[in-house]
Image (tube, helix red, strand yellow):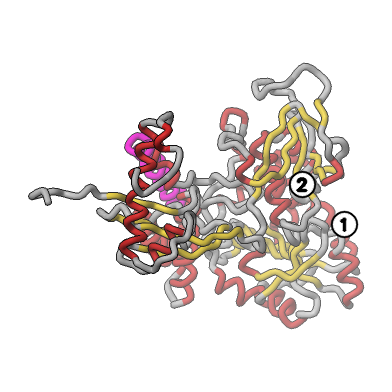
Amino acid sequence: SVKNFVSPLFTLFVGQIGYHPKWATCIQTCDESESIQLSIELNLSAPPKVMLRSEFNIVPAVVSGRLPEQNMSLKTQMEATNHQKRLAFNAYMENQISFAKSSVVGYTTKPGAPIYLIRNDAFPFRRADGVCSTKSEKDSWVTYHFLPEALVPDDDIITFEPSVTTEKSTIPKFDIPIDDVYFRGLLGDRLLVKDANNTPTLVNVSDAISNTRLIALYFSAHWCGPCRGFTPLLIEFYDYLKNEVAPTHGLELIFVSSDRDEAQFQQYYQKMPFAAIPFSDRPLAQRIKSQFAVQGIPSLVVIDSLSGRIVVSQDESRRLVHQACQMGEPAIERLFLSWLENVPDESRSMIEILELSCAEAENNATKTSENDSIMNSKAESYLRRAEGRHEDGKHTPTSQELLAARVKKIFTKLVAEGTEPNTAGAQAIQQATIECKHSPTTSLDEGLVLGKRQNYSQDDTNFVKIVSEEMYTLHSNDKSLVLGVLVVAKKYIANVQKDPSNPRFRTFRLGN
């Protein structure tokens, strides 16, 4: 009845902190009686999200073994930082057939010690010997074990430690835009690749050679005496590069067999850590030998993964590998770096542009994050998710990873459409950089809570039923009468709160 009266505006948001479920909703209204009804349940069919929790100066009752050599050599484990060990453990868990069904529940380690895997029989934990009991102590045993995400503190994260890492351990953050179309035509659709248990499985060519700078084709056979003498040297050469120099963006070896039968192939390939052309695809192996004019074995041809051009001829590569292995590990690394210098100028330029573009994207993301932390209050923080928060192998992609993945996708499409690879690389970088600047870098998933929502207002006939379900049922279908009772009840509660000791308010009556 008051002229020019303006009703207050109410905002109601219903959702789940840290997630964006489909049933999340928000209403703005001037009507205090408007409501939201939700029906929610936990999705028990989905595995719970887990993270590794740190237990300092704590050791398990028993360990099940060390992290396999294929994931990180023993020497590297002894020298690795906590961050490097975590990356190696995550990579090991990713290679398991089913992460949810894996018997491994974590690992324990300390500086100068290997990574020891633990299973369910590792419980109960016990305190380690010695006086170390805090995070500030650097020589403590630390046990990391999986717990539901909600039980792991937000600050329980192993971060990159630049002060104790070397140039060799720096892993590039961008993907190599390999010409998938060319290499599928050269190597076929699938290659044999060894898993962590040294078991060969068929893998798509694109995945087998992903993020490698150089691809070496090794032509060899078990019946060949010189081959049996050179293969152990090549394995030593490959393992050192893979484990110590360039775990990614390095060299990938592919065995092209000249064995006479399947049994010889299996016996010979069993000792190799390389990928291989399946023995059953003999015409493909013969075509590859013809394409590179291989006259004798053993023979090694090194190819640039971006352009497909030969970097080191078969006449030189075998001699250089033999010399490097005789001179030791530093010579192996020098030889690999010299091969990278032999790639075409266009390939080197493309890698440099990728590095600069990713560095720029990361700097922009850092500045944006700093500005956001200043401008957004703590009350709004639940609407955002920290980049790279999760450590279960399914982390939120960083700005660099998003840019690199987009470059690779655009590059592959342009090459398939007939664009020259160097031109396609430049166009892909330019287009991906523009797209990433105008797209969000983080997203919220739906979570494990399922539900459905429905909004109700005072004019809805169901409103009375919902509100009155928590009260005594009135023997009346008169909507105005029910609403009248509810209005009185609201006043009654307000009066009780103001004067709780007044005996008048001990019983609810319409009269008081």
Residue plotted at (32% across, 37% down) = 375
| Amino acid on which disc 1 is placed | Gly
For numbered disc 1, what is the local secondary structure? helix
Which residue has dot 1 on it? Answer: 229
Residue furthest to the top: 131
| Mark 2 vs mark 1, CA separation in Å | 42 Å
Location of the C terminus (image quadrant): top left
**Residue 368 painted magenta:** yes
Q: Which residues are magenta?
A: 352-377
Q: Residues within 10 Å of mark 1 (few under 14, many from 20)?
A: few
Left or right position of 451 against 273: left
**Residue 200 painted magenta:** no
For numbered disc 2, what is the local secondary structure? strand
| Amino acid on which disc 2 is placed | Val
* Picture quadrant of residue 501: top left
**Percent position of residue 497, x then y:** 39, 34
Residue furthest to the left: 3
User: Exactly how many numbered labels are in the figure?
Assistant: 2
Which residue has dot 2 on it? Answer: 105
